Amino acid sequence: MKYRLMGSSGLRVSELALGAMTFGANDWGVDEAESRKVYEGFREAGGNFIDTANIYSQGRSESFLGDFMGEDRERIVLATKYTGATRRRDVNAIGNNRKNMMDSVHASLKRLQTDYIDLYWVHARDFLTPIEEVMRGLDDLVQQGKVLYVGVSDTPAWEVARANTLAELRGWSRFVGLQIRYSLLDRTVERDLLPMAKAMDLTVTPWDTLGSGVLTGKYNRDASTEGRAALRGRIKDRDLGIAAEVVKIADEIGRTPAQVALQWVLGGHGVIVPLVGARTRAQLDDNLGCLEVELSAEQRQRLDQASQIELGFPHDFLAEMAPRGIEDHRA
């Protein structure tokens, strides 16, 4: 396992992050015993970056991690999130407002059995709370030592850029990471979010990197297979076509489709640290194998072509207007 810097900070995180969303989930997740095996497997592989949220499994994910870490706590870069509803019939127990932020961080600290959170994410933008309130509140948590770094998830590029510019001007803590959905099945973040992250030096931690399991090829083998993607309705023919190309390349190099799909994400533009989740230790080990996969330029081009999207306006328009014969040598 190699390590990468988290955005513009000096924080070192493993090149894969363990997503603990499956820990404690009743329907499609895993129980405490299997969650511990997944946690231990990730740590044995050298992983130090673990991601959860206060609403995952109604707080059980955080509670499991609190029990698992023990004396290992200081060696772990622990990330959790706030935004989602935590109390019924309480209009302030949801969203980005300062009250929910403070209530949520205190509850997370208790469940995680720790004094501080390494990386605290805004789980999603609510568009009700002024961004000044959000950034000032997060900076207060950093000043108090309850949080070391802050990040943002599932938020438009213009809002992230505005928030970080405001924080820079005010001398507040800036976002160092961006968590977004990204896979061969959904490349829409390439329009604005990924270029913004690269320009503003944000490390990207993509989720749903296997497209809810579609990119493992299991639905190509058997359309009646149960899983998260099947629960959402009929799987698109386009998605099955992309998965088929992933399976073909995996067969060519003697690897699994999941490893190929994850390696494609790893090789994206900017600093990318994919989230890997697992329901069993065997699934985790398979996902970790992506670090040993090498895709040729030709194979990566095939995956790009199978999954390509239209960037739309103004990107296509600007590409047509760009001066000809000029090479861009910037990194």
Image: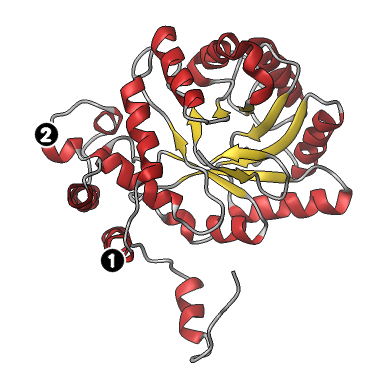
Q: Is residue 20 visible?
A: no
- Nearer to us in this view, 232 or 54: 54
Residue 224 vs residue 184: left or right? left
Q: Amino acid at mark 2?
A: Asp
- Nearer to us in this view, 163 or 182: 182
In terms of image quadrants, where is residue 78? top right
Name the residue at 73% across, 30% down. 97
Residue 186 vs residue 148: left or right? left
Residue holding disc 2:
222
SS state under label 2: loop
Front tag of 2 and 1? 1
Residue 41 vs residue 243: left or right? right
Calculate the distance from the C-alpha at mark 2 to the C-alpha at mark 1.
29 Å
- Nearer to us in this view, 105 or 253: 253
Q: Position of residue 80 (x, y in %)?
A: 61, 27
Name the residue at 39% across, 35% down. 288
Q: Of label 2 and label 1, which has the lower sequence position? A: 2
Dots 2 and 1: beta carbons under 8 Å? no
Residue holding disc 1:
298
